[in-house]
Structures are given as C-alpha cells and as structure tokens.
Amino acid sequence: MTKRPIIIDCDPGQDDAIALLLAMSSPDELDILGITAVAGNVPLELTARNSCQIRDIGARDDIPVFAGCAQPMQRDLVTAEYVHGVTGIDGIDIVEPKLPLEEMHAVDFIIETLHAADDDSVTIVPIGPLTNIGTAIKRDPAILTKVREIVIMGGAMREGGNRTPSAEFNIIVDPHAADIVFRCGRPITVMGLDVTYQVLATPQRIDRIRDLDNEAARATAGMLEFYSRHDSVKFASVGAPLHDPCTIAYLLQPELFQGKQCNISIETSSELTMGHTAVDFWHTTDFPKNAMWMHAVDADGFYELLTERLSRFGDG
Ligand code: RIB
Ligand code: CA
C-alpha cells in the first residue's frame, strides 16, 4: 500500500487531538510529514504545546511539530475556551511535552515541504482556522501544484453556524484565509457541521473507547467526556459532535462519507454573515464547483474505525 503524505494543521482542541491520534494510529496508510499548529480554539502558545503533548500520547517522536500564525490574517483572534477549557484539551492531565517544537515557522515548513514534494502529492488537512494555509498560499502560490487535496473541517450549510448564526468557528476566525484557500483551484473536500453533527460521542461510544484501556484510549475518553458537556447541553444532544476526526476517517475509509461537488464561497464583507460558507448545493449559479461538500456519514462505521484504530496503541 502506498502511504499518503499529509500535513495536519490544527488548533488542539480535544477533537483535533483525537484526529491526531487517529492519524498517528495509521502509519501504514498515512505518512504524517508534520503537524502545524495555528491559533484558534486557544491561543497559539497552547495549541502548539498541546500538539506536542498529543504527539507523545501517540508515541510518534518521528513527527515534527511547528508553531504557525498567532493571529488571523486581518481579523482579531477569537478563541473557544468555553468549549475546550482554558488549556484547550481539558479532560486530560497537562504534562510537559518530551520534545520541543521545531524552530522553523509552520508556514515556512509548509512552503519548503511542498516545494520539495512531487506534483499533486501532498494532502493538507486543516482542522482549525485556515490562517497558516492561506498565508502559505498567498506568500508562495507556486506550492499549489504540489497539493493533491485539501481536506478541511469547517463550514456549515443546513446546520447553520456554531459561532454565529451564519458561520462555523474555523471559517469565521479567519474568513480571509478561508477565502484564499477556497479559491486556490486545488481539489478540496469539506467536512462541515452538516456531517460532523451526525457523529455524536455518546456515552456508549465513549465507554467502548475507555474500555480499550491504553493511554491513547483513556486520553480520548477523558477529553470526550469534558468536550461533550458543552455541546450536549447546547444542542440537547446525547454526546458532542466529533468534528475534526472526520477528515482523517475520510482519508482512511472514504466510503463512510457521501458528498456533492459544489461551489463554496466565503463571506468576507458583511459583519452579520462574516465567515458564512455559501454552499451552492443545488447549482443555482454558474460558479466553479470548487469543493466536495460532505453531507452524510455512516456514524457507526466512523466509531468502529476510531475505536479499532485506538486499540492499536500500546499502553505508553
Ligand atoms: O467548529 C468546529 C471546529 O472548530 C473544530 O475544528 C474545533 O476544533 C474548532 O477548531
Ligand atoms: Ca480544530
């Protein structure tokens, strides 16, 4: 099997952390060239630090971690401690990472790595605000020929927004970066709230993960329990949506998802609808169909995959 080279750009965040663990549990399929951190759920200093700690839980010292942009391209940073806690990964003990961050800035790493890669070879997986990716593309558009696919967690259509009535968090934090990415012309696959709200971390699913009884599974269960408290109340749902791991699950088992190629455009003018993803699902315009909008998922199959992959970790 040919390993797929990927860069995961994230803002841990419990769901980012679980996406990282799912990816790190799959070395036969995914060649993680690097983890790049961006400001989002919590400030950059914490998202970068958290990325290093999750790498330790995944026992993958071979994967470099880079700190990226601390502020969106034009707007002031907004964060989400009310969802993720003050550390960003509440639900597990915070311990000093074993290895330090790389010296290089994440945007420089992305540019250098893509320039060194073959055409159409690297998959970029942004699961936080798109600041690092938008900045890299703006600074050096020539990197785009090296990008095979961009698999994004972000946006919303039927579900409405989770940060404003119109916008999902990752997109509204940096709508200008999102606009650059969605206009870049490379294949884009989008896991928006319409699909991530279908994969709820119910108590039964969390119990199955905890019963695996290894360090990664215990950390996942602890983070999910904390993370579920907010959204379960907010949506009166049984469990919180597990947003970011949908991107990695798609790379591992694309058949779990159903989508439609559409035009997706980003609102960057109106303050009321800033960061809105206008998904032209019914092709009402002749705008280019620039993205695959995912709208259905086999939720049981998703948790079967996540649970089985977490079972592969030893007890660190
Ligand atoms: O709206 C959900 C997204 O925002 C997820 O990526 C979560 O981690 C936060 O970044
Ligand atoms: Ca995230």
Image: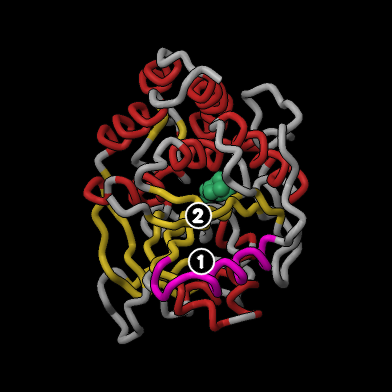
Instruction: Report the residue at 67% width, 39% height from top.
Output: 52
Q: CA distance from mark 2 to mark 1?
A: 8 Å
Q: Residue at x 62, y 54 (%)?
A: 36
- Mark 1 residue element: loop
Camera-side residue of 300 and 217 = 217
Tell me if I can see residue 211 in this picture. Answer: yes
Which residue is denoted by mark 2 in the rendering? 161
Q: Is residue 120 magenta?
A: yes
**The C terminus - image quarter:** top right
Query: Is 314 in front, or is 48?
Result: 314
The residue singled out by tag 1 in the image is 276
Q: Residues within 10 Å of mark 1 (few under 14, many from 20)?
A: many
Q: Is residue 117 above or below residue 98?
A: below
Q: Is residue 34 left or right of residue 296?
A: right
Q: Quadrant of residue 238?
A: top left
Q: Earlier in the sequence, mark 2 or mark 1?
A: 2
Pinpoint residue 55: horizontal percent, then vertical percent.
60, 37
Dominant SS type (magenta)? helix
Q: Is residue 197 above or below residue 126?
A: above
Image: magenta residue range: 106-121
Establish if 313 lies above or below 270: above
Q: Position of residue 311 (x, y in %)?
A: 39, 23
Residue 134 placement: quadrant: bottom right
Q: Is residue 69 above or below residue 303?
A: below
CB atoms at circles 2 and 1 under 8 Å apart? Answer: yes
Please provide percent x and percent y for residue 214: 48, 17
At label 1, the amino acid type is: His
- In what element is the residue under mark 2? loop
Q: Is residue 256 left or right of residue 214?
A: left
